[in-house]
Image: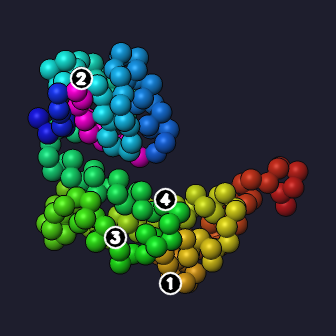
Amino acid sequence: MNSVKSNSQSTTLFVKNMVCNRCIKVVKEEFEKLGLKIKDIKLGEVVVEGRISELPFKKIKLVLEENGFELIEDRKAKIIEEIKLIILDLVRSDNIELSLEENYSDIIVEKVGMDYHYLSTLFSSVENITIEHYIILQKIERAKELLRYRELTLSEIAYKLGYSSVQHLSNQFKKVTGMTASQFKNITDNIRKPLDQLD
């Protein structure tokens, strides 16, 4: 079974759809309800105490499915999930150096430990989009979040996400969402206004 790695003291479970801190909190709480002792937990991965043979796999799979997650049992699916998590981590990183697009492929190869051409082909064949397009989609989602927070200017957001200019960000934003980043910001600002302040 490829959903696990195990040694004599602990087992690592690979979990699909764990994409945010809230996901980590939910999985941690549910595993603890099952009486599992968590040694380490991060996006897509949970290390629990005990050998594979000692774990209640049916209960683990059920509780994950009930919360919108899935135990990854297929090796290729695990690789794809790993690529997604690396990209999410990079897109959300506050380290500007890691946000530069040309570094993504190098970092993915380094972390997964496989040839990029193989990873790219595998990802495209299963997800029906390229790794590059997935990166763009995640960057635009992150840009939308940052615009909603209203803490950064468009220029700062573009820089943070590794875009060469505001224009570059706006062009990609419009391709993905159908509106410019400025239009999205204006709509979000209006939604946040109290009713008595709306025109």
Judge from the rendering whether residue 21 lies leftward or rightward of residue 104; answer left or right.
right
Picture coordinates of residue 84 (x, y %)?
Answer: 32, 55
Q: Amino acid at mark 2?
A: Gly
- Residue 165 within the segment the image draws in magenta: no
Disc 2 designates what residue? 50
| Viewer can see residue 127 | no
Q: Of marks 4 and 1, which one's residue comes earlier in the chain?
A: 4
Kindly give the residue lying farthest to the left in the view shown. Answer: 1
**Mark 4 surroundings within 10 Å by alpha-carbon count, few (fewer than 14), some (14 through 19), many (20 or more):** some
* Res 103 → quadrant: bottom left
How far apart marks 3 and 2 lie (CA) works out to 35 Å
Q: Is residue 181 above or below residue 189?
A: below
Q: Is residue 98 above or below residue 14?
A: below
Q: Residue at x 25, y 35 (%)?
A: 12
Q: Which residues are drawn in magenta?
A: 9-19
Disc 4 designates what residue? 92
Secondary element at image label 3: helix
Disc 1 designates what residue? 164
Q: Of marks 2 and 1, which one's residue comes earlier in the chain?
A: 2
Tag of residue 104: 3
Secondary element at image label 4: loop
Judge from the rendering whether residue 40 lies leftward or rightward of residue 164; answer left or right.
left
Q: Amino acid at mark 3?
A: Tyr
Q: Of marks 3 and 2, which one's residue comes earlier in the chain?
A: 2
Judge from the rendering whether residue 1 lies leftward or rightward of residue 133; answer left or right.
left
